[in-house]
Every structure is written in structure tokens, then in C-alpha cells.
Image: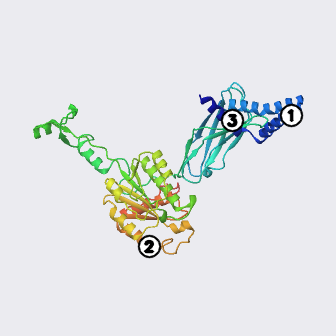
Amino acid sequence: MNTRPQSLLRTTARTFSAGLTTRGRAFLSAGLASAACAILLGYGPLLRVAILLIALPLAAAAITSTSRYRIACRRSLEPARVPVGSPARVHLRLENAARLPSTPLLVEDQVPYTLGSRPRFILRRIEPGGSRRVAYRVRSDSRGRYPLGPLTLRSADPLGLFELTRSFSAQHTLTVAPKVEALPAITLGTVWAGHGDGHAAHAAAAGEDDVGVREYRYGDELRRIHWRATAHHGEMMVRREEQTWHSRCTILLDSRSGAHRGTGPTASLEWAVSAAASSAIHLLQNGYTVHLTTGTGSPPVLTDSEDAVLDTLAVLRPIHAVALSLTQAAADDVGDSLIIAFLGTLSGTDATDLARAKPATASAFAFLMDTPTWAGTPAVPVPPGFDDDQLHAGALLEAGGWQVVTARAGDRFPELWRAASRHTASRLGVLEAPPFEPASPLESRP
């Protein structure tokens, strides 16, 4: 016995039963009751009324079911990545590929509650081969990646007797990245950007591509043969090419949940994430190789582009950890010329570990956050915002060679970045020259 027709019949019956509205069920029930009365009483006109009442829901189901699979949908995001607090626009394009006009459509897109209310649109009809465009805005004050979709279409007949729901499988992802601020072009440490000092010295002494020799290897170009060294060593020697050495930086972002205060977009962690993103992008634009680490045991992440920085920090979440260490990052990035740390509440052990892990040749800057100010706690007079433990941690960092800058709620990071540069200049004994002011005509002399 072939069960396929029976299965199809059961599926059709379930679809018909699920799609009937309250009005459609009332029409169908009235039609069946009228048919029964007409047969029992032998009244022909009542039977015709019963057939009409039964036929209307069936016709509505046939029309609606035929048209619902002829609608195509396309979604696009402008842009696909936005900073925190900035809106993005979602565009929907619905196309009718059927030969008949579509029934009225209720368009509903699935959106996480953090992006706003769920958008709904009513399209009365789409002509054959025609299309409709609708758009809506989403906005989030929290970082992350948010799925958009799937899109749901609810179609119904003009009389409201039968309706069906169709969901598309396509989804898109909106990335809400931390806010990035432009930083002034100032010097941090002794190495700014581009090539290292060692590279410049070697290039000046021996040339850009002739800074040493090594033994010949199969596949080396003949133009690289160094004949004087070959005669001296008695074997074939070739010139060694100097590898370009770029300044490298590790950015340590303290993401421990216990080290920060505040909630939502105004939390101290959000300020630290935004500052870390601004620093990383600024250094990338100036030729640095940047690694991001949370200092909680996971290896540093190489962020070789601005997109990588924003995508990495967009999904960063607080970590329930106790210890904070730079050991893993220092082991992987021995050649770092710059270390920048954004630190929450530190214990004496954390500060000691950071001081010991600092490479001797690297410049290290710590933006030590006065976390009680993010929780609404007023700062104590001297020094503002620090308790004894935080004072002790800052002193340990400075004793280990770190340059510490205090960050409080409401501070703008570009100003703190400039303060870090002034701190560097004062330690190196460099005086900042005042801006040049031309003499007035009365003061000029021939």
C-alpha cells in the first residue's frame, strides 16, 4: 500500500487546520451545520448556502497557499559594523514571482531586544513580477554581534478566513563595535613607528639588503653571491637579506569582572575597551604590529587590521578570573618596543607580576583606572580617587619601570594619551617647546 498520498493528505489537513482563522472556522462550522439541516429538512436553498459557506474557506486556503511560496526576500545592512550608540539601517526587498498579485502580507523581522522593538510592516499587495522595499533602523548601546532574521511573512486572504506564516532561513549579523576616538600624533616611549633603530643602523652601515653573509643554499639567486667572502671562507657565500623589523606593541586589557565597576555602557570596562580600540587602531595606522591580550592566561591575539581590532573587541566579555599577568604576552612578544595596559582595580600581587614581566627594553604605560568613580563613589582628596591598595599598586608599577596615568570616570582618553606623552618627555628630560607665535609688526626691527 502506497503511504505517500496518505501522508500528503495528512500534511494538507494539518496545514488547513492550522491556517484557519477564527472567522474561517466560524464559516466552515456554519456551512457544515447548514448542510446537515438542509439534508435533514430537505430544503434545497439552505444547501446552496451551506456549500457557499464551506467553499469560501477552501478557496481562501487555496489562493493563500499558492501565493505564499512565490515571494522572495533580500536583506542588506548599511553598514554591517557600527560603533556603540550609532544606528544601522536594514533594507528589505520583497519580490513577487507569481503570475497573480499577492495577498496582503504582514512582514515581521526577528530582532534581538537590545536592538529595539521588532519591526512590522503591512503590504497590501504586490503585483506580478513587482517588488516592494521597506527599511528600518536598529541601534544598540552594548557591544556584540547580533543576528537579524529570519524574516517572517504572514499572508491572508482579503476576507480574513485563512492565513499562513512563512519564515525565510537567511540571517545577517550586525556587529556593534566599541567607539573609537582619534588620538593625537605624539611619541610614546623611545620608538615611534615603522622600522626599529637597529634596522636603521644596519642599513646605514651595510646597505638595505647587504648586512651580512651566509653559506650558499640551493635555490639562492646567483646575484646574491658575495665573492670576497667566498674567497675568504673557501666556500660559496651569499649576501644575507635584512628582514624589515617593525615596532611591536602589546595592549593589555584587564577584562576581569571583579576589577571593574559600573553597569551597562557607562561601566569602567566599556571605557577601557574603547580606549584599547582607539590605541590599537592609532598604532596600526602608524606602522606598529599590535597584539591584544587580556592577561588571564590566553595567548595574545594578533590584530593586523582595523577590522580585526573592532571584531575582536566587539565580542569581548568580562572574565571571572583572579590573577592578572603579562608573562604569556611577554614570552610571545620578546621584541616589543611598547606595552600599553588598561587596568582596573589591582592587588599588590598583580602589580608585582606586571612589574616583573615588563621587558627591560620596552616602554610600558599603564592607564590605571580609578574604578570607584565609575560606581558613583566620590574620590578621596589626596590623591583623588585612590585607596591605599590602588596607591600601592601604582607605586609598584612605577618602581618596575611602568609609567602610570590615572583614569577617572568622565575623562576623555585623548587627553590622557597626551598626558602620557608629557610624562614620557618629563622622564627623558625633554622640554616641550611652546607654540611659535610670530612677532607683531610693532615689535619687528629691520
* Horizontal side of residue 391 vs 120, given as left or right: left
Up-down: is 423 above or below 18? below
Marks 3 and 1 in Cβ contact (< 8 Å): no
- Going from N to C along the chain, the mark reached first, 3 or 1, is 3
Which image quarter holds the N terminus?
top right
Above or below: residue 24 compared with residue 411: above
In the rendered structure, the answer to whether residue 341 lies left or right of residue 85 reads left
The secondary structure type at the circle numbered 3 is helix
Q: Quadrant of residue 367?
A: bottom left
Question: On the rendered structure, is 266 left or right of 399?
Answer: right
Label 2 SS = helix
For residue 13, the mark is: 3
* 10 Å crowding of disc 3: few (<14), some (14-19), many (20+): few
* Picture coordinates of residue 139, whole percent (x, y): 61, 49
Q: From this viewpoint, which residue is outermost toward the top? A: 99
Please state which of residues 443 and 73 is positioned toward the viewer in this rendering. 73
Residue 280 screen position, x and y as percent: 44, 51
Residue identifier under label 2: 389
Closer to viewer: mark 3 or mark 1: 1
| Residue placed most toward the observer, 257 or 60 | 60
Secondary structure at numbered mark 1? helix
How far across and down, in percent of the image, does residue 57 sit?
77, 34
Residue 228 position in % (x across, y down): 14, 38
State how far apart marks 3 and 1 are (Cα).
Answer: 27 Å
- Separation of marks 3 and 2 at Cα, in angstroms: 72 Å
Name the amino acid type tagged 2.
Asp
Mark 2–mark 1 contact, CB under 8 Å? no
Q: CA separation, marks 2 and 1? A: 94 Å
Instruction: From the viewer's side, name the closer residue of 183 and 8.
Output: 8
**Of callouts 2 and 1, the N-terminal one:** 1
Crowdedness near tag 1: few (<14), some (14–19) or many (≥20) residues, C-alpha within 10 Å = few
